[in-house]
Amino acid sequence: MSRHLVDTWADFSLTSRAVWISGLSLVAIGATLIGSLVWGDYGVSFSHALELVAYDDGSDAAFVIHEIRFPRLLAAMLVGSALGLSGAIVQAITRNPLGEPGLLGVTAGASFAMAFSMTFFSLPTSAELAFGTVGGISAAALTLAIGMKARLDPLYLTLTGMSVNLFFGAAIIVMLVSANIEVNGIYYWLTGSLVNRTWDHVAILWPWVVSGLILGLFGAGRLDALILDEDVLASLGIRVTTWRLLFGVVVVMLAAVAVAAAGPITFIGLVAPHIVRFGLGTQGVSHRILLPLSALVGAALVCAADLAAKWQEVPVGILCVLLGGPVLVYLVGRREVSDA
Amino acid sequence: MRNVLNFLLSFIALCSSAVLAQGYPLTIIDDRDKPVTIAQPPQTVASVSSFGADVMAALGRQVAGISTLNGQRSAYLGDSATKAVSLGEVHQTNLEILTQLAPDLTIGLRTYTEPFARKIEETGTLLAFDLTTLDDSLNAVTLATRALGADSQGEAMNKGFLDELEAAAKQTDGNVSAVFLWHWGNVPYAYYNNHLTPQIMVRLGATNIHGEPPQGMASIDSAAMTMEALLRLNPDVILSFKGEAGPFVQHPAWQRLKAVQSGRAWRVADHYVMSHGPIARRMVLHEVAHLLYPSVFPEPSEIPLAARAKPMDFER
Amino acid sequence: MLSVPPAIASRSDRRYAMGLLFLSALLALLVLASLFFGAVSLPAGDLFTGLVSRQASSLESALVWQLRLPRTLLAVLVGLQFATAGLILQAVIRNPLADPGVIGVSSGAGLAVVALLLVSDMAGADPLIGTNQPSMMAWLPVAALFGGLAAASLVLAMSWRAKLCPIRLTLNGVAVGAVLNALVMWTIIVWGGARTEIALIWLAGSLYGRDFLHLQVLWPWCLVGILGTLALLRPLSLLRLDDAVSASLGMRGLFWRVTAIIVAVILAASAVAVTGPIGFVGLVTPHLSRLLAGPDERSLIVVNMMVGSILMLSADLLGRSLISPLEIPAGALTTLLGIPVFLLLLHRQRRLGI
């Protein structure tokens, strides 16, 4: 039986598999959509909730659905797709199948900036998010600037990124200890969470995600090429460093805005592209297919994790690590087998 | 066996202090369950958290050293701790300064002092208290005043507070709901009924919308609360420690809260969190009574300006 | 083996001797500074008298003997242990970024400590045990030690099938570390309450409030670790090489790799148990030391130990004097200080000698 299924799956063409993956992701997103609109601390019955989605009668219940649950869900989707997208791109430009946007220093830089602004200023939401984004971009710029020296050599870049990450991680602790604000709160934010996100967050997120997706799709051919060997690329006359830098900027923008909005959510950028590759049954997927599917799978993962988080109030970021860690172990194990 | 021993020890301690009146040496069992012997009437007293300074001030004395919270001394203590040296943050007492101070007695919060009790005891005697509930407060005041040789004053403080609470409770009609929050970033945290401040609110007839702590988690005094839950429970009065502007205020749901619309959201000072000292708990009682029932209770005047409740500003 | 021309050998010997002299002087200076500076400033002469006479009643003696001396000695030992563990791991895993965190020691210890604090807190609320249970704080180092050992064994076991292949080991370590850290954060958030600060301070890595009791726990492990390192002298330089090469040299690769990792775990886990996870000393010290020591493995190990102690001592000294009466955890400072150094090295060397 299962043998038969495997054969059937193998017979599928790449296109129909891609359709299947996007279909499944959309179903997952749809299910979480209904779930997260209906489910929450403000008890609204299922049918009443559906009525309220259709029209806003000005009641508190309608307010909860339109102003609290809807933006939270959209923020989750946008954060997920931003992370999935940037993960797929970063794996191509660092030629590291285990690459992650956090490796460019973005996550820790944005976290530090957010924690800094929360500790020392009281900014409006949009200014705070902009501050966090700028923090992430600066940290990544630092990483890239140091990495430029070695023409953005992947190994060198990874080393630099990890150090920049650790540096800002320590800076957060120093700041926390010397300013000593309530640690519970910052811990909550540092785990990554979508609690109490508003339309302000959505407004900041969507332009970046959309333009990131469009840019990625336009550059998909170049991304396919960047995976090749350095010498081959040089002989093809492709300016490797320029393209790496360009895509690096896109990754940084996407990841920084996602972290600013939701806190550091890790592993989604790593896992989403691999789920797509696994589903498609091949490693060498064209980025024209890989990018949109990674965005979709990332969105589905974060939405599902956020729904689960609502149920037990486990921060989303923690669920993503608990999910992503084993996947990483599995991937590593499989790679070892395929290498042998 | 341990409990029997403790009981015997406290019994002996009780008897000895009763028989010898204020005779030293006396033995006190603090919340670490540890018999602490105090050889002489303490002259130099250090306070880790505001509680010790509060007890001393209530007895008309000054502490020699006091810890800070977020880099600041508790405003409600006013001038009563001006001469004290700073011992650093409450969770990490500076041991060198404490050694230099060489206090006869250090009164501290158990959670912060117990892990380093051995080092603190090298500088002098340590009394460590758990301070969450009303019972904790009553017990700690009794023991601390006994250690300071002022048993009768301590008993009077406790009795006076309970009487005042009882008297105030009789004047209220209930029928008001409230919540006591602290927050960080855009996540509010609400205190449960096991903390003294909500206990005072409840005793005054108000309903604490956050209720009792979950089963088996009795040691937790507060937990995160979503905006949805806050909107559903929609309290009449909101008290918030650290209620400055920022993302907290930016959330659109705030504008819909009853307490915000009617101007009954207040930011309160740190003695609402550490409300267990004899001075702090009376201030909290008076102010909370006024904030819950402004027509029944007048605005208290004894609270230093910096420590008074201020309306939360929700201008966007 | 290759023979080194005598001229070069003597030049590098001289350089090594000078370096050693410089490091010893610096270490001695820092030890003295650590004894004489602090939140309370007193005349050096009085402190010296206090150090020599050791009268329990005098303030100087109390400061030196109860607070500063144990911290100083612990900083020396802990720095040495982290640095050595880092050196061994970088050789064995053939990864210039390896540090004790890579094999899960830090996160395992962190989870064990938080779990212990949680259990003791839960027990406090349990009517059967009584509200005033004895403190479990004394057991923190023990819990951390076993947590670190357990997590390291888990990482090793997961990588066992791949014959402890370096890449596999690193990635498994990263995954296990991330999951354990997430569990730590989760516990802290759900549990909340006042104990969080204590856990957080521990997780930041600090020598606050440590005394001779910790030293008594630490020194046997330190001794075992150092002896183990000495036994590893020759195999270590070969482990850097490819498996095929070391096999051709008659190395029992797997045996030595396991032994080396066990020694590193002993050193790191016992140090983490006392101070909490101190970041970056294990990572950055070997790179710094290589600049000073030259190619010889034996001198590298000695120099590496001294540099580790120096880093740790200066971090602790700065941490407790910069914003006194507050304290910055040494672990945060080592990271803040260590990273720019590391980036600078990276910048200069371009290709790190692995």
Image (tube, helix red, strand yellow):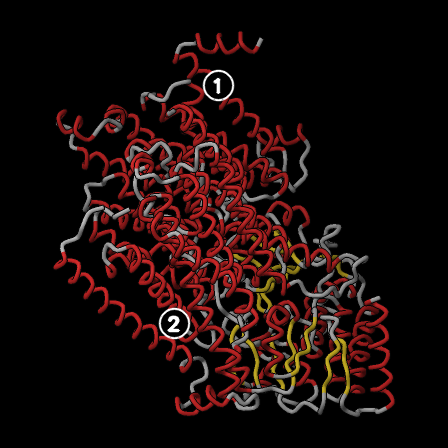
Residue under numbered circle 1? A23
Q: Position of residue C259 (x, y in %)?
A: 45, 47
Dot 2 amino acid type: Leu
Residue C257, by quadrant, is top left
Asked whether the beta carbons under mark 2 and mark 1 sit within 8 Å of each other, the answer is no
Give the label on residue C328, or none. Answer: none
Residue A132 position (above or below residue C318): above
Residue C191 position (above or below residue C78): above
Residue A133 position (above or below residue C52): above
Question: Chain under label 1?
Answer: A
Q: Position of residue C208 (x, y in %)?
A: 51, 70
Q: Residues within 10 Å of mark 1 (few under 14, many from 20)?
A: few
Judge from the rendering whether residue B98 lies leftward or rightward of residue A136; answer left or right. Answer: right
Q: Position of residue B264 (x, y in %)?
A: 63, 61
In depth, the one of A316 and B233 nearer the eye is: A316
Question: Chain under label 2?
Answer: C
Q: Position of residue B221 (x, y in %)?
A: 68, 59
Give the label on residue C318, or none. Answer: 2
- Res. B261 visible in picture: no
Judge from the rendering whether residue C40 lies leftward or rightward of residue A61; answer left or right. Answer: left
The residue at 63%/50% (across/down) is: B230
- Res. C296 visible in picture: yes
